[in-house]
Amino acid sequence: MSKIVAILTGIVITVVLVAAAHFTGLISLNLGSSGKPGKYKNKGILEVICDAEISRPGEKLTPPFETSRSPLPAVFDFEEGTGAYAGEYTMSMNRKGTLKAQGDLLELYRPAMFKRHGVVIIGEHVTLDRRTGEFKQWLDLDGGKRLDLIHGSCKRTDNAPF
């Protein structure tokens, strides 16, 4: 009888520890999931603050870049299908990018056509991975080139999960 009580006690303690780890975010159990991406409520406005490493290119837009760390706010408006952030070559609130949500990934895109340091900038991209909080920003350059400028990690301003 004491062996059964010990086994049941061990099972209960294990279940409680796993449940606590799941609810604190230490592990993800994906209960009831069929391998599909997480469900997000793509409604309203999502505001995040990112701890970002910003690379500032020099005169020729070639490495090495001057880098710095900075907090960076970003806003994703699902109702309007737009978004903005405060960064380099920025999609500001008065010049928002177009929002596309695909599973975990949010992407902002704004076409551009201007010349900087002898290179034509064709477009600007921002992505936020809602599963990991990873934030990236890059520019599309003429000739099919890509210039990565910002990367970091983000959290919602209200500390709720994405």
Image (cartoon, rainbow, N blue to C red):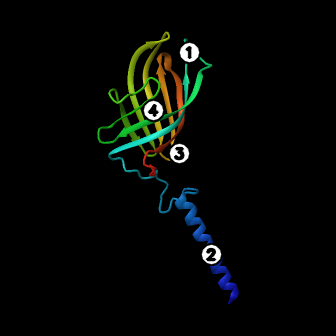
Provide the secondary structure element on which disc 1 rests: loop
Q: Which mark is residue 126?
A: 4
Give the number of the mark in front: 1 or 2: 1
User: What residue is at 55 percent from the left and 18 percent from the top?
Assistant: 57
Mark 1 or mark 2: name the one nearer the start of the chain. Answer: 2
Tell me residue 105's x, y (percent): 45, 41
What residue did someone put label 1 on? 58
What residue did someone put label 2 on? 11
Number of numbered discs: 4
Give the number of the mark in front: 1 or 3: 1
Q: Which mark is residue 132?
A: 3
Mark 2 or mark 3: name the one nearer the start of the chain. Answer: 2
Distance from label 2 to label 3 (Cα)?
31 Å
Mark 4 or mark 3: name the one nearer the start of the chain. Answer: 4
Neighbour class for label 3 at 10 Å: few (<14), some, many (≥20)? few
Distance from label 2 to label 4 (Cα)?
46 Å
Amino acid type at mark 4 = Val
